[in-house]
């Protein structure tokens, strides 16, 4: 099956980036949000990021307009998914919210539709079991900023079939991304490797080994990371980092994943990184 039309559920940081890359690669998008103001914000962000690409001469004005025209807004999940080949869910990382969404999608999406979740930490097998078609359910894990990062981590749940995997692999390649298959396990591969590094960096700050700036400089200049782990943690969201570490800690029952006390404190204080204006750094 050729994926010609997708529904992207959620227009937040990940959702608007996912809608952006599908529409820019000539796959029409139904972008589904809960309120018009959130949809307007998502569209404004996509436009801003497309403008940035025009400025850098990566695309021209005509491509920008065609991309914007390829995105239709829906405020109703059932309406938005009824005629698509693929659904990509990017709603908040909360099982109850995802459950409500997937139950609606399962009822309304066509029988042939593939169901993909952009979750970074919830079990794909568990989400798939919320639907009547777990063999068509798969993880399609994008990375922020979605228009820039080449990876799509494709997560196969226990019951995901080969046809579903092949369709999603091809669709990811059409986005000029590199799909990498992994099996369902806490944190998949990306966050199982990334989050312990971020956590350890936070322990270093909490124990007074070095300042946040100095920890980041070590990793940028010594290990050629584009961003140090603490700036990256701010960029991802400290609440998201804590949630993922808790998934690893509970999933493996291994103390090596215990969240750093400083991370817990910062989340309790509402210092969540870029999105709240303060984390390890401050932002305008
Ligand atoms: N849309 C389109 N283009 C964008 C963009 C966006 N949202 N954000 C950045 N860009 C482009 C810029 O225009 C620029 O293009 P050129 O190369 O043509 O100049 C390029 O990306 C680099 O951006 P900047 O020059 O503004 O800044 P930079 O060089 O400091 O790079 C960065 C910024 C790409 C974010 C880089 O710092 C980086 O790669 N950081 C690491 C990001 C990362 O690790 N992301 C994964 C997070 S984990 C996750 O998402 C999943 C999870 O489960 C937690």
Image: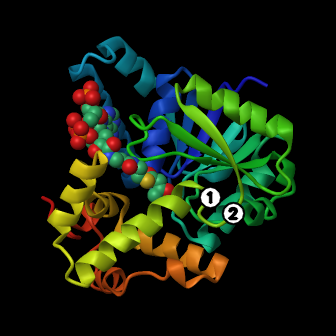
Query: Hey, which quadrant is residue 5 in on the image?
Result: top right
At a point 58% along the width and 64% down the height, the residue shown is: 121
99 relative to 52, above or below = below
Of residues 206 and 218, the one drawn nearer to the viewer in this rendering: 218
Residue 104 in picture, x, y percent from top left: 72, 58
Residue 36 appears in the figure: no
Residue 5 appears in the figure: yes
In the picture of the structure, the residue carrying the numbered disc 2 is: 185
In the picture of the structure, the residue carrying the numbered disc 1 is: 188
* Residue at the front extreme, as displayed: 222
At a point 75% along the width and 41% down the height, the residue shown is: 114
Of residues 158 and 11, the one drawn nearer to the viewer in this rendering: 158
Q: Is residue 28 left or right of residue 1?
A: left
Residue 156 in picture, x, y percent from top left: 75, 50
Secondary structure of the residue carrying numbered label 2:
loop
Neighbor class of circle 2 (other Cα within 10 Å; few <14, some 14-19, many 20+) is: some
Query: Disc 2 versus disc 1: distance between alpha carbons?
Result: 5 Å
At a point 30% along the width and 15% down the height, the residue shown is: 61
Ligand 1: does it lie within 8 Å of the C-beta at label 1? no
At a point 31% along the width and 13% down the height, the residue shown is: 60
Of residues 279 and 136, the one drawn nearer to the viewer in this rendering: 279
Residue 28 in picture, x, y percent from top left: 57, 27
208 relative to 33, above or below = below
Q: Which color mode does the image show? A: rainbow
Query: Hey, which quadrant is residue 128 in on the image?
Result: bottom right
In the rendered image, which quarter contains the C terminus? bottom left
Q: Is residue 222 left or right of residue 158?
A: left
In the rendered image, which quarter contains the N terminus? top right
Instruction: Say if mark 2 contacts mark 1, CB within 8 Å.
Output: yes
Residue 279 in picture, x, y percent from top left: 23, 70
Ligand 1 lies in quarter: top left
């Amino acid at each position: 099956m050729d994926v010609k039309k997708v529904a992207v559920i959620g227009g937040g940081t990940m959702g608007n980036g996912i809608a952006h890359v599908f529409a820019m690669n000539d796959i029409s998008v139904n972008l589904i949000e809960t309120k018009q103001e959130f949809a307007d914000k998502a569209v404004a962000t996509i436009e801003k990021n497309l403008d940035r690409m025009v400025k850098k001469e990566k695309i021209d004005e005509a491509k920008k307009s065609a991309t914007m025209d390829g995105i239709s807004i829906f405020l109703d999940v059932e309406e938005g998914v009824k005629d698509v080949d693929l659904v990509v869910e990017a709603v908040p990382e909360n099982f109850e919210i995802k459950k409500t969404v997937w139950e609606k999608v399962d009822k309304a999406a066509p029988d042939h539709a593939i169901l993909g979740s952009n979750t970074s930490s919830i079990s794909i097998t568990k989400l798939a079991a919320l639907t009547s078609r777990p063999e068509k359910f798969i993880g399609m894990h994008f990375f922020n900023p979605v228009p820039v990062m080449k990876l799509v981590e494709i997560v196969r749940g226990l019951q995901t079939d080969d046809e579903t995997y092949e369709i999603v692999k091809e669709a990811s390649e059409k986005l000029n991304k590199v799909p990498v298959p992994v099996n369902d396990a806490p944190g998949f591969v990306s966050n199982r490797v990334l989050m312990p590094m971020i956590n350890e960096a936070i322990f270093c700050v909490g124990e007074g080994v070095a300042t946040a700036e100095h920890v980041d400089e070590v990793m940028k200049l010594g290990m050629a990371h584009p961003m140090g782990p603490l700036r990256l943690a701010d960029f991802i969201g400290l609440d998201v980092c804590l949630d993922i570490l808790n998934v690893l800690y509970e999933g493996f029952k291994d103390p090596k994943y215990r969240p750093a006390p400083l991370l817990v404190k910062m989340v309790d204080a509402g210092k969540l990184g870029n999105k709240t204006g303060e984390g390890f750094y401050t932002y305008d």
